Image (spheres, rainbow, N blue to C red):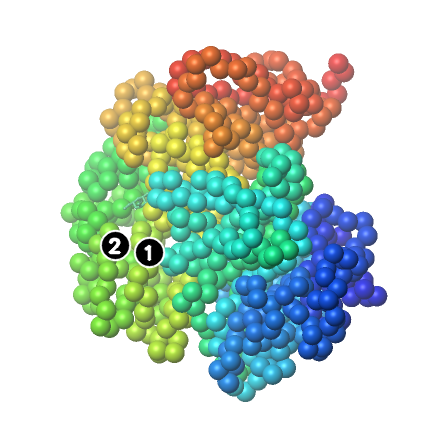
Amino acid sequence: MGIEFLKNENIFHLSGGDVSYILKIYKNAFPMHLYWGKRLSDPAISWYLEAPYRRKKLLEGTEPDDPMFLHEFWPYEYPEYGMSDYRPAALEVVGQDGCCISELRYEGYEILEGSVELPGLPSVWAEKEDAQTLKLILKDQILQLQAELYYTVFEKTGAITRHTVLKNLGKDSLKIKKALSMSLDMKHAPYEMLQLSGTALREHWIERRKLGIGETYLESTRGISSHQENPFFALVEKETTEQNGDAYGVTLVYSGNFLAGVSCDMYRSARVQIGIHPGNFGWRLEAGEEFVTPQAVLSYSQKGLNGMSSKFHDLFLNHLYKGKFQHAPRPIVINTWEAAYFNFDHQTVLELAKKAAKAGIEMLVLDDGWFGHRDDDTTSLGDWFENSRKLPKELKGLAEDVNALGMQFGLWFEPEMVSPDSELYRNHPDWCIHINGRKRSQWRHQLYLDLSRKEVQDYIIDSLSNVLSSANISYVKWDCNRRISEPGSEGLPPERQDELLHRYVLGLYHVMDVLTKRFPDVLFENCASGGARMDAGMMYYFPQTWASDNSDAVCRLKIQYGTSLCYPPVMTTSHISASPNHQMLRQTPLDFRAAVSYPFNLGYELNLCKMSDEEIEKISEQTALYKKIRPLVQGGKFYRLLSPFEGNQTAWMTVSQDETEFLVWYYKDFADPEEAYINVRLTGLEEKAHYQAEEGNVYSGDMLMNLGLPIQWKNGDCFYQMWHFKRLDGIDF
Ligand code: GLA
């Protein structure tokens, strides 16, 4: 396991778990991709590169310096623009001569224990004993550009991370126009592509489509990773299901503009790529400087989509966020947004907190509207001081009163924004993203602060630090409710304006890095009008995300199902809200709403003061139950069983890490007349083990996984069933 170098063949074999990734340095010059998939016992597969089906004529020039050498027929690891390869390049660099040509040649390699840090960028990391890293060193002699390709392979899962470091070793400046995090050419591509797409209130819906010849790319050009397309995709066989078949997942540890997808050439060889979007991107690399791409994460499994997701979940739970809450129980919160919107004061918040405390809720989060003179969404973003009319005892007094009820106190911010009607804007009208002479388009009456600028980063750090030090604040909901337009910065010279969007993301990471280190006991939650910036980059700093502003339980089935393809359920907050639901106006029973939230990170988002005693009693039962199952749902392994994208039923399950217990949930959103009998086939169990349901029935693992768990039939909408099983040891049947 780890990284093996086959000297005779110039092959590197990266292996971990049941996965092999094999590349070869062809003619000691070009890193070529040979294989990524189920582990091979013999990685000496050089022959595969020159497989007989390739047209002999096209291979006439097989020496790299032969003018007949045609790059477009070879499977590359990091293709550059300018040679005879007409597929999309991973790298485009302009030299002093103004030409965009580079040709990287192999110079050497190193094998390192553990992972390497990416300066200024978040990353999936590994201790020395968990992973090995291969560093390939390549060089373009004319540009004097060195490219280092990093591959970290994880011992347990075979998950692989990749990124590239570009170094200017020459005396002249270079201009990077495109530098993706990774690229690889898979010879055969009979694949379908699966993606998470949507819009606000409809995040992460699964789209699955057949790949044809040509380009199939996902992207964001909005400045953040976006509602529309998440920086994740999977390549699957036609036959791949949740439980079986090849699934190749790719994601990016980055929160800005991205490009991700596949280009299939005339031989159906697929170029798979992900990285910073090259549109409106550029980077001037001065002599001696280096540029680091974000990190790509690759997860392969032959055990279907669940196998692929499990590996992502394992990485993101154990090797991404490092702080105090990594494995700590996440509190049950009540959030004031759907309970009161902008309409609250000290007393009404306290009344809500009292009810919540009685119902077993552990934290009150004061959402939008507590600062400046904000009574609606038209003012005050940037003025991070209390609205003294609403909060006469200040945040300190409110936090103390909430704490006195035995609850923690949390607060909403939207730190990257400024309202034109704010003290901040009046004092610093040049601090927003804009360029003189063009209009400053507003979105929700707000502008983006220019986080590429040091003084703006410092303002956010200082103003949030002041608030967080002023009261006992245990949690921050960090929101971001618009997308970037008219990208321009007064802090950058004309020749560097195309660096703005990446510099923005680097600035944001710096701010989050400082604040999360300065306030290690604060639980930070990520939000961007719901799930518009749900990506592994944000998750490195913030261990949980508000996945959608749509809190309707029926819609949440799809949103949460799709989200779980890449991101673990504990990182996805799911709040029980009012009925009729505020977004969909749909009525659903309270129990059903709770059942949809339990397998994720549970909270509430409704006005408890308007609920009956009977309903509050039910909520107390829900919080008591959740506290009992919390270690399992927040720490366990999650598997999808029935997809809401294929019908009116959804099922999923959570198995404890030690596999001694598990929970299963089944939901039917809308009733069907005269349904067929349904058994839900489980997964992730031991065939020979026996498991006892809470009501006493005992089933064998193979029965539960092959015959399945029979679903009780009940007419009506919003039906659910939930089971809690424990493993019985040493039972002789
Ligand atoms: C965004 C968030 C909501 C809420 C509002 C407040 O829309 O996604 O949860 O915080 O902002 O304005």
Pointer 2 with pointer 1, Cβ within 8 A: yes
Q: Amino acid at mark 2?
A: Trp
| Residue at 50% over, 45% down | 195
Tell me the distance, in whole angstroms, between the alpha carbons under discs 2 and 1.
8 Å
Q: Quadrant of residue 264?
A: bottom right
Q: Which residue appears farthest toward the right when viewing the image? A: 8
Q: Which residue appears farthest toward the bottom when viewing the image? A: 171
Q: Residue 470's mark? A: none
The residue under label 1 is 483
Q: Position of residue 213 (x, y in %)?
A: 56, 53
Q: With respect to residue 629, does 65 lie above or below?
A: below
Q: Which residue appears farthest toward the front when viewing the image? A: 57
The residue under label 2 is 443
Q: Position of residue 156 (x, y in %)?
A: 69, 47
Foreground of the two, 269 or 300: 269
Q: Position of residue 109 (x, y in %)?
A: 71, 69
Quarter of the displayed picture in which ligand 1 can be seen: top left
The answer to whether residue 534 is seen in the rendering is yes
**Total numbered labels placed on residues in the image:** 2
Q: Position of residue 366 (x, y in %)?
A: 29, 43
Q: Is residue 655 left or right of residue 158?
A: left
